[in-house]
Image (tube, rainbow, N blue to C red):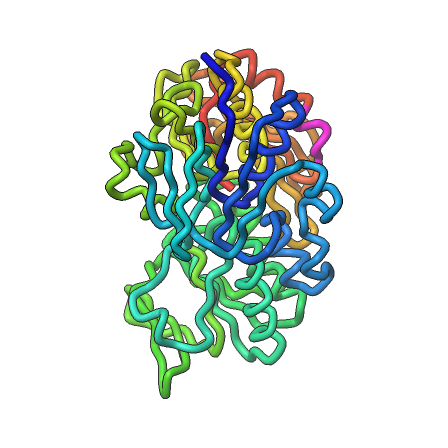
Amino acid sequence: MSVPDEVLVVGASAAGLSAVEALRRKGYQGRLTLLGAEPHPPYDRPPLSKQVLSGDWSPERVRLRQPDALSFLDTTFILGDPAVGLDAAARTVHTAAGRVLTADAVVVATGLRPRTLPGQDGLAGVHVLRTLDDAMALRADLRSCSRLVVVGDGVLGAEIAATARGMGVAVTMAGPQPAPLAMQFGPLVAGLLAELHTERGVELRLGAAVVGLAGEHGRVTGVRLSSGDVLPADVVVVAFGAAPATEWLAGSGLRVDNGLVCDSRCRAADGIYAAGDVAHWHHEQLDALLRLENRTNATEQAVAVAGAILGDDRPYTPAPYFWTDQFDARLHVHGTLFPDAEVSIVEGDVAERRFVAIYRRDGKVTGVLGWNMPKQARLRRQELVATSMLVGGKS
């Protein structure tokens, strides 16, 4: 396999920037181009729902690298110009502004797009939270908000609810699960999260699906539930998941199924690779397709892709890891926490909200969760690795 003369990375994300940095770190001296849909240089997304939304951090603080560090990469940055098409055979990307970019290798790192509710785009006061601009727009609305409804009871929805309460906003969380993150953490930890949010003043309206929005004079006034109830709101955040940003790959000839489908080397076709949230790749230890939505995987998979481009013929087989911060609780998760797993507390005390839990399924350890015990959870991760149950999680 020859080293490509030019590599084009599509997506100025954490995964995209990590791919560029890993290529240079591994000694690649060819031409590099990083294409981004947003006008901002690469930035970190996890702080958007916490430090940026609360105002504790300025937007500049989430930049992944300062200008001099980006300049050192000797890379052409094209920002504010989304990719709209790909000719995989020719390895040519077309952009919204009419650019035609061709390279010997293309890395797809376009991440996710938020799911939305019908009629959402026509109502003022309704937000999603995926980009830096999203976070700033939501923060501006929250500063004069009387009632926020968060549509979504997963990681992002729970983090937004916690941050907004910390800003003094009245918050209602709506979603179909019996408790926040019940399908990820199971009843024990999800129940503790429900208690935490309730104690801090979040009103939980869970167990009923959100079916739509109510509005008057072009502005949102409430959230409609399947039960028939309407939750009053003057600001709404829709945070019930995201889908891989693959629309621009239509007609490319590549297989798209819950992301860009790749082999165990994160390769979708000859000279085409994927990294981060958009990649749906073959995990050899599981003998199954896997897609991970978390910051850690974005970086690690990008490094693996850089190696594959340069001829390192090794499968990518990570042990999944993510974390979430809500109020004063920091949860670290290694592996997969099946909701029907057997859960045992192996360190700490649940009553003190400082513990490590081991998740077992069919007698095998599949996941480790630490609640305010990150070091202890990381040490217990060895039990997970020993079982080879490296099954995926999301963040």
Residue at coordinates 48% horizontally, 12% vertically from top-left? 313
| Residue 294 seen anywhere in this rendered image of the structure | yes
Residue 135 locus on image (x, y percent) = 57, 62
Q: Nearest the camera: 303 or 68? A: 68
- Whether 97 is drawn above or below 289: the answer is below
Rendered view: 304 above or below 238:
above
Is residue 375 a member of the stretch shown in magenta?
Answer: yes
Foreground residue among 229 and 158: 158
- Percent x, y for residue 124? 43, 77
From the viewer's perspective, tell me whether residue 199 is left or right of residue 277: right
Q: Position of residue 208 (x, y in %)?
A: 34, 59
Farthest residue toward the bottom?
217
Residue found at x 33% / y 32%: 90
Magenta region, main secondary structure: helix
The quadrant in which residue 14 appears is top right
Query: Could you say which is closer to the camera, residue 302 or residue 210?
Result: 302
Which residues are the magenta region? 373-378
